[in-house]
Amino acid sequence: MIVVTGATGNVGRPLTRALIEAGEQVTAVSRHAAAVPDGVRHAAADLAEPASLTPALDGAKALFLLLSGDLHAPGARPADIIGLAQVSGVRRIVLLSSQGVATRPLGPSRVAMRALEDALRESGLDWAVLRPGGFASNALAWAESVRTQRAVAAPFGDVGVPVVDPADIAEVAAACLLDDRHTGGVYELTGPEVITPRQQAEAIAAELGSPVRFHELTRDEAKAAMTQFVPAELADDTLDIIAAPNPAELRISPDVERVLGRSPSPFNGWVARNIAAFR
């Protein structure tokens, strides 16, 4: 049995499918009740209360650990989840971390994530760490405005980073959960190209066959929108990167290809698969 946290999200859904296709039994964990594929067990748990995860871990051999934004907040104790997994007999954890742990190690949210990575390394369990950059699926935040106004609003319109397709993250995660060769691996995951928010809007417009207007937000406007969903510290850390990515954050990582034997998927490929959200 493999337990997938964040199973209803942009990484968890394709990861669950990949594990099923590999013949694995899967427990899909989300905070609330959710529909899951046939043959998958669902468990509701709030990772801010690690004990709520105990029933899901019964009989599990591996855990995919994805933290929600509130587990980056001051006072959160996500390392308790690792201890709970040990007690429950889990033998392997694959942690979804962040590229910023290496590229911006002094950011408050990155310090907390580094501490979690260190706790995992010291746990005695088999482990792997995934460090993605920006997600292509962050563009879903524009879906309503594209549908209703054919408009995208984002900060730093002409500053790009190599955003990664969540399906690629999921496929790498599945490999790390299933293949001992990846034990102890730390993988930086990016897309194959640097792409700006304005260019992302153009890619959506091209797939729609309809113009999409781009409106550039100020940093303060962007932070106000982000802090509706994540702690202010995490919003600031993210905005620091997308405002002025450093050379390490602009680098196209070879790790997706190293693990999967193929190039990472481009942003327009993600758009083509998800265009219904923008129609």
Image (cartoon, helix red, strand yellow):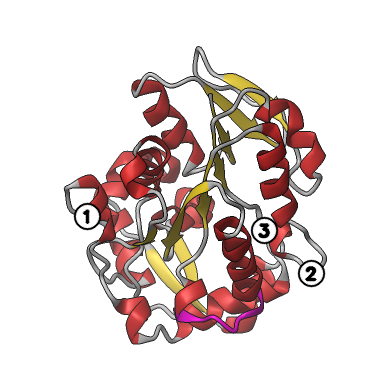
Q: Residue furthest top?
A: 39
> Residue drawn at (18%, 53%), measured in percent from left and top?
263
> Residue drawn at (61%, 66%), measured in percent from left and top?
113
Of badges 1 and 2, the one in the foreground is 1
Q: Identify the secondary structure beneath mark 1.
A: helix
- Point out the stretch of residues depicted in magenta: 103-108
Quarter of the image holding residue 266?
Answer: bottom left
Relative to 43, say whether 236 is above or below: below
Which residue carries the number 3 mark?
69
Q: Residue furthest left?
A: 262
How far apart are the two marked residues, 1 and 3, measured between alpha carbons?
A: 29 Å
Of badges 1 and 3, the one in the foreground is 1
> Residue drawn at (59%, 73%), measured in percent from left and top?
110
Look at the image and say whether residue 69 sits in the magenta stretch. no
- Estimate the x, y position of residue 137 in percent, counting from the top left: 44, 52
* Type of the residue with mark 3: Gly
Which residue carries the number 2 mark?
74
Magenta stretch, overall SS: loop
Cβ–Cβ under 8 Å for marks 2 and 3: no
Residue 122 shows in the view: yes
> Residue drawn at (72%, 38%), measured in percent from left and top?
87
Instruction: Describe residue 218's horizontal placement relative to residue 17 as left or right.
Output: right
Q: Identify the secondary structure beneath mark 3.
A: helix
Q: Identify the secondary structure beneath mark 2.
A: loop
Image label count: 3
Q: Nearer the viewer, residue 150 or 98?
A: 98
- Estimate the x, y position of residue 39 in percent, counting from the top left: 51, 12
How far apart are the two marked residues, 2 and 3, measured between alpha carbons?
A: 11 Å
Of badges 2 and 3, the one in the foreground is 2
Which residue carries the number 1 mark?
258
